[in-house]
Amino acid sequence: MADEREVDGFKDDRPLASEGEAKALASAVRLRILRLCLDQALTNKEIAQRLGANPATVLHHVRKLVDTGFLAAQQERVGARGAREIPYLATRKSWALRLGEEFWSDMTTAMMDVFRTEVAQANPAQVNVSRLGLRLDEEQYGMLNQRFKALFDEVNGWESRPGAKPYSLFLAIHPDTGRE
């Protein structure tokens, strides 16, 4: 069962991320860099400006993402002052991998941090959130997870249309321990 994971009827047959890949994704900064470079190639300086971060710190994260195949260097270009610049573009590899159980906690924390940061930067009137309390047996939980995966896979495959605006989709299901 090394090539797939099944939890409560939900089968995930994506390849397992290596330890290096999983560690690269378990960082809120790196996840934000991937999101910034999803639609357009950005240089380290441009990424640092958008994050409001030190370029040297960002370069460390960019190199880690390049080394693990999550970012790809694009054709070198000359900047405004004649300096050599290398733009980077996200490869979408992160969607094609699954993490081992030992990395779930770190990845969940990183994803929650990214979500909070991005939502805080958005216009509250444009953030559509809902919350629902459920009681599910194992079969229902598995069916719901399968539908979530199918929805994300479908939406991920949509072709970007001219004039389309960037959005992020965050979905979580978790045990509601306060209701036990």
Image (cartoon, rainbow, N blue to C red):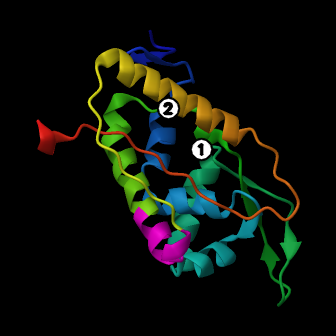
On screen, residue 45 above or below 61? below
Residue carrying label 2:
18
- Residue type beneath disc 2: Ser
| Picture residue at 74% right of the left edge, 38% below the top | 157
As helix, strand or loop, the secondary structure at mark 1 comes to loop
Q: Position of residue 97 (x, y in %)?
A: 56, 32
Q: Is residue 130 visible to us here?
A: yes
Residue carrying label 1:
68
| Picture residue at 49% right of the left edge, 48% below the top | 24
Q: Position of residue 91 (x, y in %)?
A: 71, 46
- 88 horizontally vs 138: left or right: right
Marks 1 and 2, how far apart in space?
9 Å
Q: Position of residue 1 (x, y in %)?
A: 44, 9
Magenta highlight range? 116-126
On screen, residue 63 above or below 177? below
- Residue type beneath disc 1: Thr
- 82 horizontally vs 165: left or right: right
Q: Are marks 1 and 2 in contact (CB under 8 Å)?
A: yes
Residue 6 position by quadrant? top left
